[in-house]
Image (cartoon, rainbow, N blue to C red):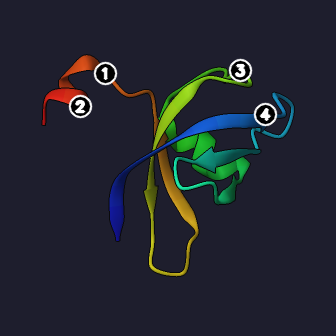
Amino acid sequence: MLSGMQGTVASFDPETGGGTVYRDDGTKVSFDGETFALSGLRLLRPGQRVQLTVVDDGAVTGIRIPTIHDSLE
C-alpha cells in the first residue's frame, strides 16, 4: 500500500460519490463512492488538492484533505 500521494481533483459526482484525481506525477486515477463515503468528507471540488492512499494495483482506497502538518513530514 502506498499512502501520502497527492493530487488534484479533476471531477467529482456528488450523487454517486465517485470521481477522478490527477496525481502529481500526471497519472489519472478514479475513486468510487464507497471510498469517498469512508473518507468522511462531504464534497470535493475540481482543482482541490487531496491526499490518496493507493494499493499496489493502483486502486484508490483512501482520500483525505492534506493539512499543513502533512507538508512538514
Residue linked to disc 4 = 12
**Place of residue 46 in the rendered image (x, y in percent of width and height, measured from the top left):** 74, 25
Spatial distance from mark 3 to mark 2, Cα to Cα?
20 Å
Identified by mark 1, the residue type is Thr
> Do the numbered discs 1 and 4 sit on residues whose CB atoms are within 8 Å?
no
Residue linked to disc 3 = 45
Spatial distance from mark 4 to mark 3, Cα to Cα?
7 Å
In the image, residue 38 sits, relative to residue 50, either above or below, namely below
Q: Nearer the viewer, residue 34 or 66?
A: 66
Identified by mark 3, the residue type is Arg
Task: Find residue 67 and name its label.
Answer: 1
Q: Quadrant of residue 70?
A: top left
> Do the numbered discs 1 and 2 sit on residues whose CB atoms are within 8 Å?
yes
Q: Which is nearer the N-term, disc 1 or disc 4?
A: 4
The residue that appears at 25% across and 18% down in the rendered structure is 68
Outermost residue to the front: 25
In the image, residue 67 sits, relative to residue 73, either above or below, namely above
Label 4 SS: strand
**Place of residue 12 in the rendered image (x, y in percent of width and height, measured from the top left):** 78, 33
Label 1 SS: loop
Q: Nearer the viewer, residue 53 or 71?
A: 71
Quarter the C terminus occupies = top left
The residue that appears at 54% across and 81% down in the rendered structure is 57
Q: Residues within 10 Å of mark 4 (few under 14, many from 20)?
A: many
Q: Which is nearer the N-term, disc 3 or disc 1?
A: 3
Q: Which is nearer the N-term, disc 4 or disc 3?
A: 4
> Do the numbered discs 4 and 3 sit on residues whose CB atoms are within 8 Å?
yes
Residue linked to disc 2 = 70
In the image, residue 13 sits, relative to residue 26, either above or below, namely above
Spatial distance from mark 4 to mark 2, Cα to Cα?
23 Å
Label 3 SS: loop
Identified by mark 4, the residue type is Phe
